[in-house]
């Protein structure tokens, strides 16, 4: 299974793609969509949408995982982040991907073992789990961590009968049954 993880942001949206082969996690690609700050809000959101679609087209993921956004101390920032997240979700949906959402706490706990882990701890664990030569940039690491979280959570969801794909059920993409 190939998972596309997204760490949404209005200025910087991280993406990370991994393959899951049984217990093995294999790095495929990662990066950051940097959105020029001099664009109008609508143009910035379109930039995120277009780049998410492009990443999905180039990497051909089976499923996507996105970090959930919670209200923080600045309502304006929260609203803008929510709009960026919406653009990312639309790009994923337009690409025919099923999307799963995880909180930052869930992601950190799945990757580091503690929901209160620092960004640097997440970066180092992503590096170790994916056998990377170097520490990934913060936005890429967060997106890869989101994908890793889904890889770890998917077997639990299947065992509990709450989703997942079986060989007999097939998958849907763009309204067509695959496999």
Image (cartoon, rainbow, N blue to C red):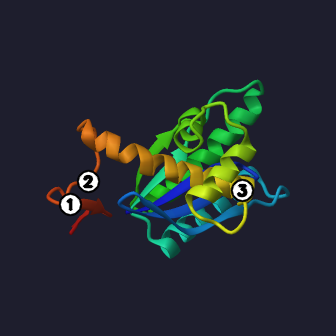
**Is residue 45 something that shows in the picture?**
no
Q: Residues within 10 Å of mark 2 (few under 14, many from 20)?
A: few
Q: Nearer the viewer, residue 98 or 4?
A: 4
Residue 117 placement: quadrant: top right
Residue 177: horizontal and vertical position, in percent? 21, 64
Q: Please state which of residues 99 and 43 is positioned toward the viewer in this rendering.
A: 99
Check disc 3 and report its element: helix, strand or loop: helix
Please give left or right for residue 6 compared with residue 22 in the image.
right
Name the residue: 77% across, 27% down. Answer: 74
Judge left or right: residue 20 versus residue 141: left
Read off the residue under disc 1. Answer: 170
Total numbered labels: 3
Q: Residues within 10 Å of mark 3 (few under 14, many from 20)?
A: many
Residue 165, label in figure: 2
Q: Earlier in the sequence, mark 1 or mark 3?
A: 3
Determine the CA span between mark 1 and mark 3: 36 Å
Question: Horizontal and vertical percent for residue 112?
Answer: 60, 41
Marks 2 and 1: CB-CB under 8 Å?
Answer: yes
Please tell me how crowded label 1 is: few (under 14), some (14-19), or many (20+) other residues with Cα within 10 Å: few
Identity of the residue drawn at 26% across and 35% down:
160
**Alpha carbon of mark 2 to alpha carbon of mark 1: how far?**
7 Å
Mark 3 sits on what residue? Answer: 44
Residue at image x 73%, y 53%? 138
Measure how far apart labels 2 and 3 are at the Cα level. 35 Å
Which residue is at the far right? 38
Residue 139 seen in render: yes
Percent x, y of residue 1: 37, 63
- Tag 2 and tag 3, C-beta contact below 8 Å: no
């Amino acid at each position: 299974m190939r998972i596309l993880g997204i760490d949404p942001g209005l200025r910087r949206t991280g993406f990370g793609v991994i393959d899951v082969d049984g217990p093995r996690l294999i790095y495929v690609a990662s990066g950051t969509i940097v959105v020029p700050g001099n664009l109008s809000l609508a143009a910035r959101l379109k930039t995120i949408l277009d780049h998410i679609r492009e990443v999905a087209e180039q990497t051909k993921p089976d499923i996507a995982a996105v970090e959930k956004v919670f209200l923080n101390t600045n309502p304006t920032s929260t609203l803008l982040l929510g709009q960026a997240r919406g653009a990312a979700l639309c790009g994923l949906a337009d690409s025919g991907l099923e999307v799963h959402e995880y909180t930052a706490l869930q992601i950190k706990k799945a990757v580091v073992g503690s929901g209160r882990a620092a960004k640097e701890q997440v970066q180092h664990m992503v590096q170790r789990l994916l056998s990377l030569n170097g520490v990934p940039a913060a936005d890429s690491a967060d997106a890869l961590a989101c994908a890793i979280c889904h890889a770890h959570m998917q077997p639990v969801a299947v065992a509990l009968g709450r989703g997942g794909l079986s060989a007999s059920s097939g998958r849907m993409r763009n309204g067509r049954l695959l496999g």
